[in-house]
Image (tube, rainbow, N blue to C red):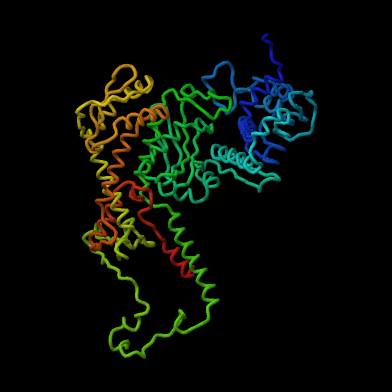
Amino acid sequence: MAIKQLSETLINQIAAGEVIERPASAAKELIENALDAGATRIEVATAGGGKTLLRIADNGSGMSPADLELAIRRHCTSKIDDALTDIRTLGFRGEALPSIGSVARLSITTRTAGAKEGAAISVAGGRTEPVRPSPANVGTVVEVRDLFFATPARLKFMKSEKAEAAAISEVVRRMAIAFPKVRFVLSGSDRSTLEFPATGDDRLARMAQVLGKDFRDNAIEIDAEREEARLTGFAGVPTFNRGNSLQQYAFVNGRPVQDKLILSAIRAAYAETIPQGRYPIAVLSIALDPALVDVNVHPAKSDVRFRDPGLIRGLIIGAIREALTRGGDRAATTGAQGMMRAFRAEAYRAEPQRAQAPWTAAASPYRPMRFDEPARGFAEAPQAAFQEFAQPAARTAAPTAATAPHGTIESAFPLGAARAQLHENYIVAQTEDGLVIVDQHAAHERLVFEAMRTALHSRPVAAQALLIPEIVDLAEDDCDRLMAHAEEFLRLGLSIERFGPGAIAVRETPAMLGEMDAAGLVRQLADELAEWDTANGLAGRLDYLAATMACHGSVRSGRRMRPEEMNALLRQMEATPGSGQCNHGRPTYIELKLADIERLFGRS
């Protein structure tokens, strides 16, 4: 078969398949162009999920007629010179506009600040019309219609209009977080208007716009530096989590990325603090020398490669864990809000029930007290007259000066002073501006686990030798990866040796794990190393065992505690990092402010 040169249009359409996968891909490329042009206001309009219409208007620097003519040609860009080692802009490949023009109807109208009039150009399915004069404001308006009309097969792989519109919204959210000084507006016939006003240098305010106002109250600031890399951003407290990872945002030198190294580091940093199937909320920004990161891995530019991935992973894990140690022991504010909603819902349901039921004196909440029964007069005891209002037994705790610092009362502590124990499981404590309800079993379980884990990792784990070494057959690449971490495994009680080119000999296993499937563990570690280039599986197994032992060795539900025991538990919680959630990720306490309580009684 003879080899022939492909046409320019077909070359562009092939390239478009990599650069423009869906309407959201086109939106991302065009928004990046606007940001590179210095825009402070970007307006995005869509119709049909972006397949029918996608319009990006900005107030950036605009283009001259000569630049406009070059902009729609492949590999024409103003953002790099001759090297790919110093990329400081979002775009640099020069493929977005020609790729879009090869599969859609593309029109661009633009004007620079010093020009008397603007210029416009149109491209439809790869066919270009000449540049023409056109009235325009300073900046650029790019309009994409009938996306993929020139490649109908691609339309069959598109999702519903609603799903495509949601994907564009997600692109705008990521860009909005990365650039808080820019105002973003997203509108169209297929959506309600979404607007993110500029917040200047207040990055947390922009994050609150995108992630919800609760994020501001439940976020811990991160600012760490290691060698030539700096990590900044905010991470949510462990109890403030979600059912998916969609609210984990990562940026490298201002570029939104979806890098599995970063996502795995976030997952590792929150290990043992979030229940399985739940995901933390985090916004992380990494700044480093452009020469130390490769952003030219894929035309979509969402994947990156770090020259030293171990440095970046260690920086993320260490910074998040330090932040959680510093402030992550507090419970999420959403717990108190959920309680408030539950109270309001119960009150709402009770009100219609009272309205529908016939009135009787016995059922009325305003019924008079009864003194007609012989055994229920005031002569007996005041409690007898209120017998029908009796509450569950509660153990009260009087504050003692012994546990108060420098003579202050215990309510000055963050978790306050224990006042009562309800149902032999819940401690009620009074703070200076509200009250705290503590799950005594969950709280003590976390305290025991942290103590055990500290002891576990402060020295090498005891190992037990196998009578006969177990030989595990693996691919040669897996063996190489395992042996690269042999010293780390040895510290955790697992001794392995190379046994030929395609096998590993297991000579010792962690003693505290008892009898175990050594071959299964080694294969799991090999798979984890191949996927994430980390070896957390064995440490995780040991931590899991520590968590199980802590669960069975903690204060059980149903045990009555003395006042001094309750206060001691509260003080220990305040001194232990991560005590805001148990080993399974559930909150250990909920705090209600006095203002919240007053709202329940209609006093505010």
Residue at the image point whose x is 43% and y is 65% from the top: 597
- Report the side of 219 relative to 582 (left or right): right
- Answer above or below: position of 389 versus 154: below
Residue beneath the point at 79% across and 31% down? 134
Across and down, in percent, residue 575 comes to 29, 49
Count of marks placed on residues: 0
Displayed quadrant of residue 154 = top right
Q: Which of the two residues, 144 or 155, is positioned nearer the viewer here?
A: 155
Front one among 270 and 476: 476
Q: Is residue 485 left or right of residue 296?
A: left
Q: Position of residue 303 (x, y in %)?
A: 52, 28
Is residue 267 at all visible to an observer of this figure?
yes
Look at the image and tell me whether residue 112 can be seen. no
Quadrant in which the N terminus appears: top right
Q: Report x, y in % for residue 546.
A: 27, 43
Quarter residue 95 falls in: top right
The residue at the far top in this view is: 2
